[in-house]
Image (tube, helix red, strand yellow):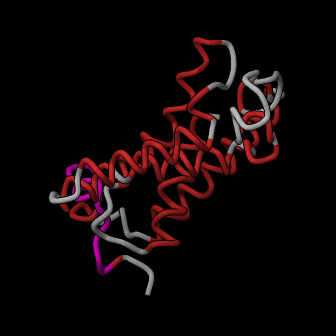
Amino acid sequence: MFLWFVILAPVLVAEIFQSPMADYRVVAFGAVLPLAEIVFGGPRYLHTMIVAMGLMTLVMLATSKRRLLRRRLLGIPIGLLLHLVLDFTWARQDLLWWPAFGFDFGTGGAAFNRPLELGILLDLIAVGVGFWAYRRYELDVPENRDLLIRSGRLNRAAMPT
C-alpha cells in the first residue's frame, strides 16, 4: 500500500491545486507518515482529524512570516489529510474523529488490515497513475525530472491549464 499513498497524494495535489511551486516530495512524505504507526500494530494518532488539523494549525502559526517555509511545510499536513482520504479512514468515525467517540482507536480498517490482494491491486493502480503523471508532467524531459528531484516542484509549462 506504500505506492498507493506516495504516488496518488502528490498527483492529486498537483491536479487539484495546480501549484508548480508546491514541494510534492513533502506531500508524499506526509501521505506515508501514518504508515509509521505499524510499530503500534495499527492506526493511531496520525490517522485522526485532530492531529492532521493540529499539525496544519501549527505550521500556519509557526511560519506566519516565512512564506517559503510555510509553502514547503504545508505539504506534510496536506499529505496527512490525503492519507485519511486514500486510506478510507473517513469510514471509521471512531478513528477519524478520535477522541470524540471515545479514547479507543478500535480495530480493523485502514491499510494495516486490508487483504494483501487489495493492497497489491491499489499499488498497481498507483503505478498506472504514476505512468500517466510521468507523461502528463513531461518528466521524460531531463530538466523537468531534475526539477522534481532537486526541488520537489513541477515545471510550470507542464502543469495543466
Check the image and report above or below for 80 versus 129. Answer: above
Q: Give the quarter of the figure containing the N terminus.
A: top right
Query: Magenta stretch?
Result: 145-157
Q: Quadrant of residue 124?
A: top right
Residue farthest to the left?
A: 65
Give yes or no for residue 64 being in the magenta stretch.
Answer: no
Residue 139 position in % (x across, y down):
36, 63
From the viewer's perspective, tell me whether residue 81 is left or right of residue 153. right
Q: Is residue 42 left or right of residue 21?
A: right
Whether residue 16 is situated above or below residue 151 in the rendered picture = below
In the shown orientation, is residue 28 left or right of residue 88? left
Residue 73 at x, y = what percent? 31, 49
State how many labels appear: 0
Location of residue 72 in the rendering, given as x and y in whole percent from the top left corner: 28, 53
Q: In the picture shown, does residue 56 fall above or below 105?
A: below
Which quarter of the rendering shows the C terminus?
bottom left
Residue 128 pos. (x, y %):
63, 55
Q: Residue shown at 61%/44% (left/top)?
A: 49
Which is nearer the eye, 134 or 30? 30
Q: Residue drawn 73% across and 37% down?
A: 100
Residue 66 placement, left or right of 38: left
- Residue 121 occupies quadrant: top right
Residue at 47% in and 43% down: 54
Between 90 and 136, the one lying in front of the other is 90
Task: Specify the principal SS of the magenta part.
Answer: helix
Residue drawn at (73%, 42%) of the image: 89
